[in-house]
């Protein structure tokens, strides 16, 4: 489940980044968060392949994996929030 949640977050941040880029605006916090979620999705995909090679299912749809997905999403959003605050503080100084 954490794989599905991480891919959904990566796609969401990719859409936000693409929309901002089309308007001529580059948001470093959005870009970094997008890369973080895509990196996590890649990591979970490798873990899924390892599970398949061991005879297990690719997606783990257990409660523990769902909780792990929420922890990963929460941590990514907290880091995104901190990056936004830092970015706004830098812009306010300039």
Image (cartoon, helix red, strand yellow):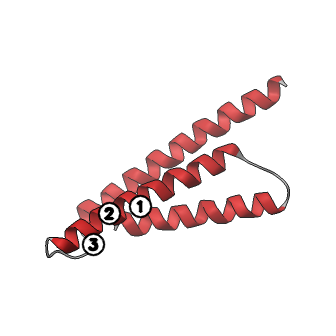
| Residue under numbered circle 1 | 42
Q: Residue at x 23, y 66 (%)?
A: 50
Numbered mark located on residue 83 in the image? none
* Secondary structure of residue under mark 2: helix
Front-most of residues 8 and 62: 8
Which quadrant is home to the N terminus?
Answer: bottom left
Q: Position of residue 62 (x, y in %)?
A: 24, 68
| Residue under numbered circle 2 | 46
Is 27 above or below relative to 45? above
Circles 1 and 2: CB atoms closer than 8 Å: yes
Q: Residue at x 49, y 48 (%)?
A: 76
Front-most of residues 34 and 85: 34
* Disc 1 residue crowd, few under 14, some 14–19, many 20+, Cα 10 Å: some
Q: Residue at x 38, y 51 (%)?
A: 71
Q: How many marks?
A: 3
Q: Residue at x 59, y 47 (%)?
A: 32
45 relative position to 64: left or right: right
* Secondary structure of residue under mark 1: helix
């Amino acid at each position: 489940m954490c794989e599905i949640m991480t891919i959904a977050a990566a796609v969401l941040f990719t859409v936000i980044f693409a929309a901002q880029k089309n308007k001529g605006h580059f948001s470093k916090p959005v870009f970094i968060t997008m890369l973080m979620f895509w990196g996590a999705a890649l990591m979970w995909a490798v873990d899924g392949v390892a599970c398949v090679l061991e005879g297990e299912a690719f997606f783990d749809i257990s409660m523990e994996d769902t909780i792990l997905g929420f922890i990963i999403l929460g941590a990514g959003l907290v880091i995104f929030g901190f990056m936004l605050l830092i970015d706004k503080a830098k812009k306010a100084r300039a």
